[in-house]
Amino acid sequence: MIYLKNCTYIDYKTLKFKNTDILVECGIKGKIHFYKEKPKNIQISENIDCKGQFVTHSFANGHHHVYSALARGMGAPRKSPENFYEVLQYIWWTLDKCLDKDMIKASALATAIACAKSGVCFVIDHHASPNSIKNSLQTIADAFEEVGISHLLCYEITDRDGIALAEKGLNETESYLRTHQGLVGLHASFTVGNDTLKTAVDLAKKYNSGIHIHVAEDDYDQKHCRETYNKSVAERLDEYGVFQFDKTILGHCLYLHENEKKIIAESKSWVVQNMESNLNNRVGYFNGSGLGKRIMLGTDGMHSDMLQSSKAVFFSGMGHEYNSPAATYERFRNVHNYISKNNFNGDEANNLVILNYDSPTEITEDNFLGHFVYGINSTHVQHVISNGHLIVKNKVLTTVNEEEILNFTRKEGKKLWEKMKNS
């Protein structure tokens, strides 16, 4: 067990401050206990003095893409994209087809390290590697667990590369769900035919899971659905039962009509906002008005820093929907509600981040939200505890050799870039 003394503990739900010592249990279901002084006759593996620092629940990412981790710094695509569909075609669909098992492992390790160092202990990921599907989810899971990051994974099933690969995606999903918590991933309505959509929903029912899918990220998704199925994206997904699951996650949701928002708001589904990715792809701004309260935040593979994403949501959202530090913080923390309400493992109270936040001004219960959007960032992450294990100590990973892994990821990144040049 870990003992944290001289803590200023911030309850992430109520934002109440508490001066206390904290005993942290190990394990996937571990708890924390508050003390005025260190209890006797308890075996402690690690003592950390948190004087002047702030202890709170760790962070979680509601929508990530491990497969994009080696994209940073890569060369320009063979054609400059003129619209969102071409962004997918010439960048991301070129990249994901080039991935092999070693590249997937490197991508997952790089992502897990970045998550850990920014205080993120739980990741919901949406993976794609059309030419390396089998065991891809297990490869990611193993890498995450090596670093110490909990996860909820899925494979991005799609018909865009043919029915045979769609079936491989379905098989990979079922194989993984037999022994792991996870979701049934689908790319988007415009790349998923009716048969694949029905099979995916049936698979989610069979394993008491849910669907994780991109929804109306660009207006192309809506136009395709109208032209092909004579209905909107939300209407089509609702007709096939995608929204019936408490575990369903709908990514982006930018181009929705009011009746679609109503369908989603009245369903059991959760929406995940990915502001920086939307800005990067020039697809527009998210507006959660009419979608209800089940909105959480993700990075969509842009990076792994949820504190950075929350600031992007706050500042970029101004002028596009009602926004406030409290509303942003609610979305930032909503992912924990999603995890808890659906009984997923890996986000109990013994997941903590210790912030060495050297603010030039006083921080209190009353002004914490102002510090959240204007001050606190990932450089303040000093220690990270995941499932009761100290995975980052004084900003250094304790579970893996970061230098060795980065040498591996850089090698695999170069291989990927060379392969993409010839694709």
Image (cartoon, rainbow, N blue to C red):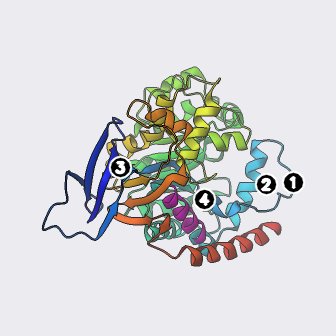
Q: Residue 128 has which mark?
A: 4
Distance Cα–Cα, label 4 vs label 1: 22 Å
Q: Secondary structure at mark 1?
A: loop
Provide the residue designation for mark 3: 208
Magenta residue span? 106-118
Q: Residues within 10 Å of mark 4 (few under 14, many from 20)?
A: many
Q: Nearer the viewer, mark 2 or mark 3?
A: 2
In percent of width and height, residue 300 lies at: 60, 49
Q: Residue 90 has which mark?
A: 2
For residue 189, what is the image quadrant?
A: top right
Residue type for callout 1: Lys
Mark 3 or mark 2, which is nearer the start of the sequence? Answer: 2
Q: Is residue 146 visible?
A: yes
Provide the residue designation for mark 1: 79
Q: Are marks 1 and 2 in contact (CB under 8 Å)?
A: yes
Mark 1 or mark 4, which is nearer the start of the sequence? Answer: 1
In percent of width and height, residue 86 lies at: 79, 47
